Amino acid sequence: MTTTTTLRHVARHEIAFAAETSGSHPLTWAQRFQLGQRCKPHVDGLGNVNVRMVWPLEGAPDLASVTRAIGRVVERSESLRSRYPRVGDVYGDPVVLAEGSVTAEQYAAEAPHDTEALRDLAELMAKPGFGLDDPPVRFAVVTVHDTPTDLVLTLHHGAADAIGAEVIARHVARLAADPEARLRVSWQPREIAAYEQSEAGRAYARDADAHDRAALADAPMPLLAGPREEPAGVLYHFVSLKSRALAPAIGLLAARHRVTAAAVLLAAYSRALAEHGGLDQCAVNLVASNRQTPQTRESVAHLVGVVLCAVDVRAQEFGELCRAAGAAMLRALRYGRRDPELFTASLDQASATLGRPATNAYFVNIRPIDPGRLAAAAAEPAEIAALAAASELADISGHGEVYSGELTFDVWDVGETSALTLGTDSSSYDAPALAAILRRIETVLYAAV
């Protein structure tokens, strides 16, 4: 195991598990979509999109308590005891093992919670692909003077999404601090797949497909040009905007118009993108967590999906646009889980009707926004204007495939300093164009304050 510049690898711990359930089950809709189109967990390099998570271990637990907690979380999570067979890039049904082991690498640090070092370690752990016989999770425990302070893990994307990774980390930390802690019981991937194949699941799939067909027909978006090849490879244009003015502006507008912060962000982005492309309606693939029910809230599974969401941007007043975006989000997120086969058939039908591909390559990922952090960042309009003057754009474009053929708007954080990013490998947008759209989002928000 390689040592990072500030962390020293000191030990490897084998952690055995023994559980009562085993067997195989069909891939869930989300697994089929992710493993079929977006992720390749078995390849080396960060293009595999393996999930990374860093989590603090509070209360100074000893190392034995942490490794026991890891073992217990693996035992109660079928996805972490699964193997993901494949032929080439095509994945088959997951196989759940009752017994086996996982490893936890131990690293020594000079100080706890070294953000940069932990980020580098997570990236290092995520780069190697997962082999056919590998456990779908890798753990590392960082210690200071032999006391665990941080947990780092990386996941095969078929096993769980980023929210599932957070559930794993949170449960390990809680059990390490309190072995008697009671954890919520949520559906396993096997149970999710069973629901999807049930009569209720098929009825839901048909309703979701009806939503997708309507969105594909009513709001076709311009096609993106292909990536621009260079001698060093495909150039991925990636621009970020960081500002202390975003959170107070978003919070003020959300309260004023009685909508969510996510609706405010979707409204501003839809208007900026529509103005850039000369559109009356902006349709995007909205990333959906799909954890609204008690059965799925803390599932260690891949549940994240995407759903088409169309926003009419002709509204002149920003509050009206926010309400339209909020209503569109509510309608769309009811159908955040889709059967990939039904969607493929509907996409083909829409393409035939349009006489061109109906593919929507515009993605929006607004991560959960903490109301407490939003409230803590509150400011008066005059203060917001002053903070806006100090916002910063960064062009971090580089070579390499991330999400090929897509234009992706990511809201990474909304707090004291908020971060928005826009990225694509499409030659339809270069870095200056992405920067202009991000700046237009700022202008739309601050003008509405």
Image (cartoon, helix red, strand yellow):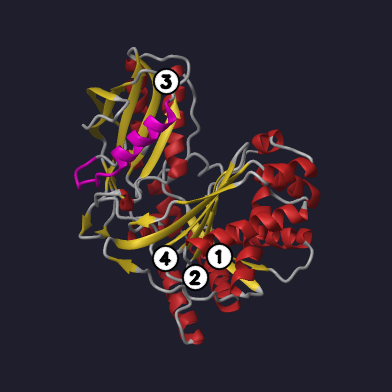
Distance from label 2 to label 1 (Cα)?
A: 7 Å
Q: Nearer the viewer, residue 48 or 14?
A: 48
Q: Gap between marks 3 and 1, in whole Å?
A: 40 Å
Q: Earlier in the sequence, mark 3 or mark 2?
A: 3
Q: Residues within 10 Å of mark 2 (few under 14, many from 20)?
A: many
| Disc 4 secondary structure class | helix
Residue sitting at x 66%, y 54%: 442
Residue 145, placed above or below residue 269:
above
Quarter assignment of residue 72: top left
Image coords of residue 301 (percent x, y) = 41, 45
Q: Amino acid at mark 2?
A: Asn
Q: Is residue 277 left or right of residue 99?
A: right
User: Which region shows up in magenta?
Assistant: 114-134
Task: State the CA–CA distance, disc 3 to disc 2.
Answer: 44 Å
Location of mark 2 (residue): 360
**Residue at which label 1 appears:** 284
